[in-house]
Image: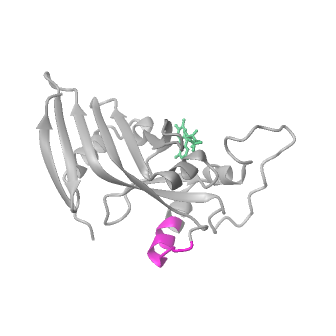
């Protein structure tokens, strides 16, 4: 069991105080393209993986971000909480759990299935749509999702984001307050920075 990282209470507090805002559970996730350019997109926070500091995100196995993380696992999350005027920037590595992953542990597969089970029918259907990011053909219709959706779709992927650095900027006070959390050899430390 991984100890709770020292930045978790600040993030938990922001999530709690912003809970009435549905979009406070969206953040931007940047990855690195094969040519070194950044690629950024909005995703939904699916909670922390139990007993870890890993953030869970879901994706389609055919999406660009999956190919990008195979080239480079480095990624950055930028998360703004409008009600409390806080920004969290989390830097770390992404890994994935999906059915194409030959080294899947039993516990990985259980977590993967649990996230699938929590998805709404409309969220599940997207995994049967034509390949994301490819040219659209009017004649190409989405595959009918199977009536039994107990099994995760073949294209369903669970991404795990493992932070090594967290930059927390709080705009509520004047001057603003900024902290940087860093992880070395599994130990988190924090320092206060100029905003
Ligand atoms: C509000 C919002 C939430 C989104 N949530 C997700 C998500 O949880 N997972 C995901 O893969 N894409 C999500 N998307 C779509 C992505 O932003 C992006 O368009 C898609 O993942 C393809 O990105 P890629 O080709 O860079 O992989 C969301 C978009 C919006 C606007």
Which residue occupies the extreme top position in the image? Answer: 174
Which residue occupies the extreme front position in the image? Answer: 35
Which residue sits at x=41%, y=46%?
75
- The magenta span reads 102-112
Q: Per the image, is 111 magenta?
A: yes
In the rendered view, tell whether residue 36 sits above or below residue 184: above
The prevailing secondary structure element of the residues shown in magenta is: helix
Q: Per the image, is 109 magenta?
A: yes
Left or right side of 39 for 136 = right
Quarter of the C terminus within the rendering: top left
Which residue sits at x=35%, y=65%?
50
Residue 25, image quadrant: top left
Residue 94 image position (x, y, % from top left): 43, 54
- Name the one closer to the observer, 14 or 101: 101
Left or right side of 88 for 126 = right
Left or right side of 112 for 140 = right
In the rendered view, tell whether residue 5 sits above or below residue 178: below
Quarter of the N terminus within the rendering: bottom left
- Structure colour scheme: one colour
Residue 126 image position (x, y, % from top left): 66, 49
Which residue occupies the extreme right position in the image? Answer: 139
In the rendered view, tell whether residue 55 sits above or below residue 50: above
Residue 162, image quadrant: bottom left
Image quadrant of ligand 1 equals top right
In the rendered view, tell whether residue 191 sits above or below residue 2: above
Residue 140 image position (x, y, % from top left): 83, 44
- Disc count in the image? 0
Residue 145 image position (x, y, % from top left): 74, 57
Which residue occupies the extreme bottom position in the image? Answer: 106
Which residue sits at x=57%, y=51%?
67
């Amino acid at each position: 069991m991984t100890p709770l990282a020292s930045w978790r209470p600040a993030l938990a507090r922001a999530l709690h105080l912003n809970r009435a805002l549905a979009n406070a559970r969206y953040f931007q996730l940047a990855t690195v393209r094969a040519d070194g350019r950044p690629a950024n997109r909005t995703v939904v926070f699916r909670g922390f993986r139990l007993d870890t500091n890993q953030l869970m995100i879901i994706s389609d196995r055919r999406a660009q971000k999956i190919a990008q993380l195979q080239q480079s696992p480095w990624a950055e999350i930028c998360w703004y909480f409008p009600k409390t005027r806080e920004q969290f920037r989390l830097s770390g590595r992404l890994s994935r759990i999906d059915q194409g992953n030959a080294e899947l542990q039993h516990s990985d597969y259980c977590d993967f299935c649990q996230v699938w089970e929590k998805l709404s029918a409309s969220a599940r259907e997207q995994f049967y749509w034509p390949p994301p990011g490819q040219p659209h053909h009017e004649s190409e219709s989405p595959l009918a999702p199977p009536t039994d959706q107990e099994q995760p779709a073949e294209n369903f992927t669970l991404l795990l984001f493992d932070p090594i650095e967290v930059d927390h900027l709080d705009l509520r006070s004047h001057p603003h307050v900024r902290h940087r959390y860093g992880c070395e050899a599994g130990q988190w430390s924090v320092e206060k920075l100029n905003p």
